[in-house]
Image (cartoon, rainbow, N blue to C red):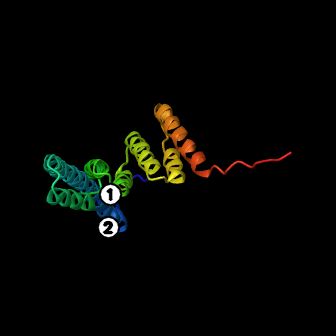
Amino acid sequence: MEVYSTENEQVDAIKQFLKNYGLTIILAIVIGVGGIWGWKYWQSHQANRLQESAGEFATINEALTKPTPENIALAEKFVSETNDIYGALASLELAQLAIDANDLAKGETHLTKAISMVKNEAFADMLNLRLARVQLALDKTDAALISLEQVKSKAWDGMKNYIRGDVLAKKAITQVQPPLIVMH
C-alpha cells in the first residue's frame, strides 16, 4: 500500500483508480442490482402465475362436477395451456372422467400428460401406478411394466408389486402356448 504525503497525491491516486476501474465498478453495481431486481421480478411473476392457475383450476374443478362437452373442452384447453401442478390435477380429473366413460385410451393420454407436468416425485409415482392399471386394462402389458419401473418411492412397493403381479399374470395368460402332446 502506498503512502501519500499530500492530499493532492491522494486525490490524484483516487482519480487514477476511478479512471482505470470506474466503468468496471459501475457495471458491476448495475449488473448486481439488475440481477437482484430480475430475480425478484421472476419470483413474483411465477407466484402470480401459480395463483392465477389455482383460480382457473378451481373454476374448472367446479365445472367438471357437471362433465358436459363444453366443460371438458374448457378443461382440456386449460391443460394444454398450463404446465404446472394445476394442469396435472386437471389432466388427472379428465383421465378419471374418460376412464369412467370407458374410454381407456383417452384416460391413458391424460395420465401421460399429467405425469409430464409433475415435478413432485410422490405425485408422479401415484400417477404412474394409475397409468399402469389403465395400460393393463388396455392389454398393454409391456407399457404397464415400464410405467411401474418409473415408480421410485419404496412407499409404493406393495401396490407396485400387486399391479406387477397382475400384469405378469395377464402377460403369461396371453402368451401361453397350447400344450404339446407327447405320445409314448
The image shows residue 147 at horizontal and vertical percentages of 48, 49
- Disc 2 residue type? Leu
Which picture quadrant has residue 24?
Answer: bottom left
Q: Quadrant of the C terminus?
A: top right
Q: Residue at x 57, y 50 (%)?
A: 174
The image shows residue 39 at horizontal and vertical percentages of 27, 54
Q: Residue at x 58, y 46 (%)?
A: 173
Q: Is residue 50 left or right of residue 92?
A: left
Q: Nearer the viewer, residue 8 or 51?
A: 51
Q: Secondary structure at mark 1?
A: helix
- Disc 1 residue type? Gln
Question: Going by the picture, which residue comes out furthest to the right?
Answer: 184
Q: Is residue 120 left or right of residue 75?
A: right
Q: Nearer the viewer, residue 111 or 141?
A: 141
- Residue with the mark numbered 1: 10
Q: Which comes sooner in the sequence, label 2 or label 1?
A: 1
Q: Residue at x 20, y 54 (%)?
A: 49
Look at the numbered discs 2 and 1 and tell me whether their residues touch, using CB distance below 8 Å.
no
Q: Nearer the viewer, residue 104 or 5?
A: 104
Q: Residue at x 46, y 31 (%)?
A: 155
- Residue with the mark numbered 2: 23
Q: Does the image show residue 87?
A: yes
The image shows residue 151 at horizontal and vertical percentages of 48, 42
